[in-house]
């Protein structure tokens, strides 16, 4: 059983029960999201949108990127210029794409990857901890994983992990490719930016003691190698880690027998 100091992070990341005033969003026959009531009137003016009681249907899925970009130009959310796949389920084929900035307003599930960078030393297991750059739009300055990121349209989870590991921490592709998928976590959370329905692919990668990550692309400011107990204490006693990083770390602690 999880210790309450750890399970609180799971509760925090599942702080909403849908529909919660939102409207079901369908692509054809497939339910893919939940529409924020703030954008609903604007959506209804598009001819490809068919309203029905309790739901709206986009009859032409190929029109979704253009509709989402139009609403961004109208100020409903920030356009990120990053296309994400839209699926009825993460294991199903992509039905359309949508800009990353529109995901919370449309309530579409996003897929991300997180990497536990582990080092086994004589005095026990350690974890590489990153500090997010102060200029990040979301959670600036928070503690983070060695590498993490969203899975862009057309890409797979491991492919994304190898890419992010190289860009964020200078981990060579042959080394990053050894990462092992350990868990898939899902949460539904209402945040300042809107509804987050995220599925996280969680990987472990054991790194040699002589490897030191380098902050390459400015996503993070620095890296530190922490004993795993220090990580556990930080997650239990503070909110210093980025909100969803806590979920992945709690899963790691559970697998290591450190979660009770």
Image: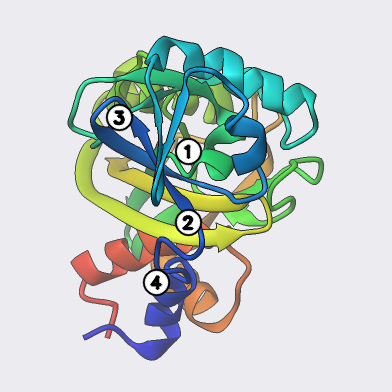
Above or below, 52 against 168 in this view is below
Residue located 47% across and 44% down the image? 107
Indicate which label's residue lies in the foreground, 2 or 3.
Answer: 3
Q: Which residue is mark 4?
A: 10
Indicate which label's residue lies in the foreground, 4 or 2.
Answer: 4
Q: Are the residues at dot 1 and dot 2 in contact (C-beta closer than 8 Å)?
A: yes
In the figure, residue 67 lies in which quadrant?
A: top right
Which dot marks residue 245? 2
Query: What is the crowding at mark 4: few (fewer than 14 residues within 10 Å), some, or many (at least 20)?
Result: some
Q: Earlier in the sequence, mark 4 or mark 2?
A: 4
Q: Which residue is mark 3?
A: 87
Indicate which label's residue lies in the foreground, 3 or 4.
Answer: 3
Q: Earlier in the sequence, mark 3 or mark 4?
A: 4
Query: What is the crowding at mark 3: few (fewer than 14 residues within 10 Å), some, or many (at least 20)?
Result: many
Q: Nearer the viewer, residue 81 or 117?
A: 81
Q: Earlier in the sequence, mark 1 or mark 2?
A: 1
Above or below, 257 against 97 in this view is below
Mark 1 and mark 2: span between their CA atoms?
9 Å
Quadrant containing the C terminus in the rendered view: bottom left
Whole-percent x and y of residue 133?
A: 74, 42
Q: Secondary structure at mark 1?
A: strand
Mark 1 and mark 3: span between their CA atoms?
21 Å
Whole-percent x and y of residue 113?
A: 38, 38
Q: Earlier in the sequence, mark 2 or mark 3?
A: 3
């Amino acid at each position: 059983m999880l210790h309450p100091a750890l399970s609180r992070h799971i509760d925090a990341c599942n702080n909403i029960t849908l529909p919660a005033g939102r409207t079901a969003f369908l692509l054809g026959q497939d339910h893919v999201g939940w529409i924020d009531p703030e954008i609903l009137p604007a959506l209804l003016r598009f001819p490809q949108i068919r309203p029905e009681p309790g739901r709206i249907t986009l009859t032409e899925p190929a029109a979704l990127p253009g509709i989402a970009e139009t609403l961004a130009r109208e100020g409903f959310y920030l356009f990120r210029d990053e296309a994400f796949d839209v699926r009825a389920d993460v294991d199903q084929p992509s039905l359309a794409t949508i800009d990353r900035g529109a995901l919370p307003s449309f309530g579409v599930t996003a897929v991300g990857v997180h990497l536990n960078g582990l080092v086994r030393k004589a005095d026990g297991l350690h974890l590489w901890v990153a500090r997010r750059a102060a200029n990040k739009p979301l959670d600036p300055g928070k503690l983070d994983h060695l590498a993490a990121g969203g899975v862009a349209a057309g890409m797979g989870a491991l492919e994304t992990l190898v890419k992010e590991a190289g860009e964020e921490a200078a981990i060579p592709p042959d080394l990053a490719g050894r990462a092992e998928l350990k868990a898939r976590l899902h949460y539904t959370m209402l945040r300042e930016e809107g509804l987050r329905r995220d599925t996280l692919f969680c990987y472990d990668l054991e790194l040699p003691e002589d490897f030191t990550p380098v902050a390459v692309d400015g996503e993070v400011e620095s890296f530190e190698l922490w004993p795993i107990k220090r990580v556990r204490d930080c997650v239990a006693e503070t909110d210093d880690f980025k909100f969803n990083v806590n979920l992945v770390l709690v899963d790691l602690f559970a697998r290591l027998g450190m979660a009770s």
